[in-house]
Image (cartoon, grey):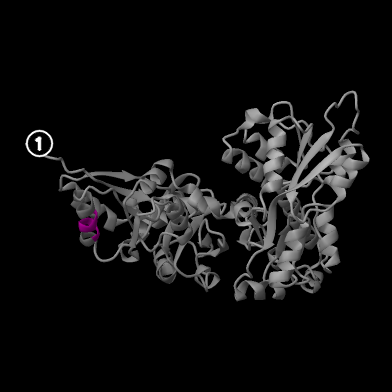
């Protein structure tokens, strides 16, 4: 009789790093995505857990670690014996925690397969994000129990080079007293960083004899840096000095499109809040699109002009329904109104023939679109698949140039449901530092479902048509990029923030306090 062999599970002790999901190693990421059960410490940031949950299997179980090391080890061993892959996710590095070392020892006494995936330590990682180099002989530690610290050794470390400790904010006074008692000079520079590598990371600098008072209000885990490296923060602080650091930015886009913009905003230090204002739905009747697709295959069109990513998706979805692909575009030239739309076309294996080199708008495209020539253009018809609420500018301009235009409704844009009450209140009361509008419909729909942004909110628009609509609704347009694309829009907002910072820095202190400039950039100088 053949016996079925039970599957063998694995156990992984995974270091989450100091908190920024981007610092999770590839091996750690793979272990988490493949896990059947993830036990996580409460020190692991929710933002990191959200990233992992979104990519892990739907049935993966996430539970907080409870009890003593032996209890956690039993949970992991039981899962492995049941054929599951179990992970204990810890902040920083696994071997930076005495409790995790005990868990590994307990697992090692069994036959279970296990691995330990290192992570960037909290102390060292946050010091780097705070702009504090640790030159010379460095000493770093993620401290769980302050009573175990050897303050004489720490004092010697400060003398030799630099010191970085990850500790609970409630232990700062005990550390100050220990350092002073061990002979550390009270005037030695100290930095204290809260929410290390997070969206609201903040560092205060002072000295050994005053850092407890300077860090008043800090809670949870903080990183204490002591020594010469702290003095370099003015020039090396990069995380907190990104152009949009701390800015709360409203992103009113469709759910599918908001992610790209939010990622770019985060790279500049902003805290994006996505509020869908538009939902994309198929046309009420498919007949127009059916005829358009048949016309493309039959050679009815000389050009297809795409004005949005949604239009590209709508056409390709209809192609897929009929078992068609990029080969059936043979002989048809493609024009795109902007870079993002062109990139969506390239994703399907086709290179557009025309993208406006100047203004990326209907007017910009028309300025470069050749009039119809009966000799050079034996087929004189253009397909224009668009939203149901698109303006007539492009179709009218093409007709004037002698082209026949099939203006087809490829998709409908409908107003999304209103956001939660707290977001509506923040929009109207100035709770957002900036709002980014990528189309006229996002302006109309945001005002319709949530009200007008407060006058202190910086308004950034993607192009001239959107600017016109914003002005019609009584909004002051502060930022408009030279080219209509999401990357340029975010870049323009970041540049605007830098200009604000430079203007405020040049103002006398009294003028700064009276300045009408709002937002985190202004507050840093008050």
Please say whether residue 245 is visible from this viewpoint.
Answer: yes
**Residue 17 lies within the magenta run:** no
Residue 298: % across, % down: 71, 30
Left or right: 502 as drawn, with respect to 3: right
Residue 169: % across, % down: 44, 68
Left or right: 318 as drawn, with respect to 69: right
User: On the rendered image, what quadrant is the N terminus found in?
Assistant: top left
Say if 363 sits above or below 507 in the image: above
**Residue 73 lies within the magenta run:** yes
The residue closer to the viewer here, 373 or 346, is 373
Please say whether residue 123 is visible from this viewpoint.
Answer: no
Left or right: 16 as drawn, with respect to 79: right
- Give me the residue at 63% from left, 61% from top: 276
Residue on which disc 1 sits:
2
Say if 218 sits above or below 306 in the image: below
The residue closer to the viewer here, 73 or 235, is 73
**Farthest right residue?**
400
Residue 92: % across, % down: 40, 53
Q: Quadrant of residue 501?
A: bottom right
In magenta, the rendered stretch is 72-76
Left or right: 3 as drawn, with respect to 442: left
Say if 433 sits above or below 164 in the image: below
The residue closer to the viewer here, 333 or 274, is 333
Residue 423: % across, % down: 63, 71
Query: Is the magenta region chiefly helix, strand or loop?
Result: helix
The residue closer to the viewer here, 181 or 43, is 43
């Amino acid at each position: 009789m053949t016996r079925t062999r039970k599957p063998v599970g694995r156990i992984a002790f995974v270091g989450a790093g100091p908190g920024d999901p981007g610092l999770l190693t590839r091996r750690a990421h793979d272990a988490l995505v493949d896990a059947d059960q993830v036990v996580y410490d409460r020190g692991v940031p929710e933002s990191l857990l959200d990233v992992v949950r979104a990519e892990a299997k739907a049935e993966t179980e996430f539970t907080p670690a409870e009890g003593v090391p032996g209890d956690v080890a039993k949970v992991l061993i039981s899962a492995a014996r049941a054929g599951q892959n179990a992970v204990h996710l810890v902040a920083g590095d696994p071997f930076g925690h005495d409790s995790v070392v005990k868990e590994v020892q307990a697992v090692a006494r069994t036959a279970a397969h296990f691995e330990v995936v290192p992570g960037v330590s909290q102390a060292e990682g946050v010091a780097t994000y705070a702009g504090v180099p640790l030159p010379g002989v460095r000493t770093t530690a993620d401290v769980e129990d302050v009573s175990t610290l050897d303050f004489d050794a720490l004092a010697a470390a400060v003398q030799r080079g630099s010191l970085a400790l990850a500790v609970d904010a409630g232990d700062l006074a005990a550390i100050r007293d220990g350092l002073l008692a061990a002979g550390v000079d009270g005037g030695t520079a100290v930095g204290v960083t809260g929410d290390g590598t997070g969206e609201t990371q903040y560092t205060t600098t002072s000295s050994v004899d005053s850092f407890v008072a300077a860090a008043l209000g800090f809670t949870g885990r903080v990183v204490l840096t002591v020594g010469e490296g702290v003095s370099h923060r003015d020039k090396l602080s990069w995380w907190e000095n990104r152009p949009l650091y701390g800015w709360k930015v409203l992103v009113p886009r469709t759910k599918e499109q908001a992610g790209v913009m939010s990622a770019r905003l985060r790279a500049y230090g902003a805290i994006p809040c996505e509020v869908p204002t538009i939902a994309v739905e198929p046309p009420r009747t498919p007949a127009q699109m059916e005829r358009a697709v048949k016309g493309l295959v039959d050679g009815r069109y000389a050009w297809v002009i795409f004005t949005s990513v949604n239009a590209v998706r709508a056409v390709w979805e209809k192609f897929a329904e009929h078992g068609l692909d990029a080969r059936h575009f043979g002989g048809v030239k493609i024009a795109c109104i902007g870079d993002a739309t062109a990139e969506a076309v390239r994703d399907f294996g086709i290179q557009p023939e025309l993208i406006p080199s100047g203004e990326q708008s209907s007017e910009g495209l028309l300025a470069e679109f050749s009039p119809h020539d009966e000799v050079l253009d034996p087929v004189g018809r253009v397909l224009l698949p668009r939203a149901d609420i698109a303006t007539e500018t492009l179709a009218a301009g093409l007709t004037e140039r002698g082209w026949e235009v099939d203006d087809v409704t490829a998709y409908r844009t409908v107003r999304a449901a209103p956001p939660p009450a707290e977001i509506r209140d923040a929009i109207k009361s100035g709770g957002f530092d900036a709002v980014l509008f990528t189309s006229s419909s996002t302006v109309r729909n945001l005002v319709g479902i949530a009200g007008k942004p407060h006058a202190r909110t910086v308004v950034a628009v993607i192009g001239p048509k959107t600017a016109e609509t914003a002005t019609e609704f009584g909004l002051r347009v502060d930022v408009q990029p030279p080219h209509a694309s999401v990357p340029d829009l975010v870049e323009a907002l970041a540049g605007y923030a830098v200009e604000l910072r430079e203007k405020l820095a040049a103002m006398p202190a009294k003028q700064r306090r009276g300045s009408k400039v709002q937002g985190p950039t202004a507050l840093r100088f008050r």
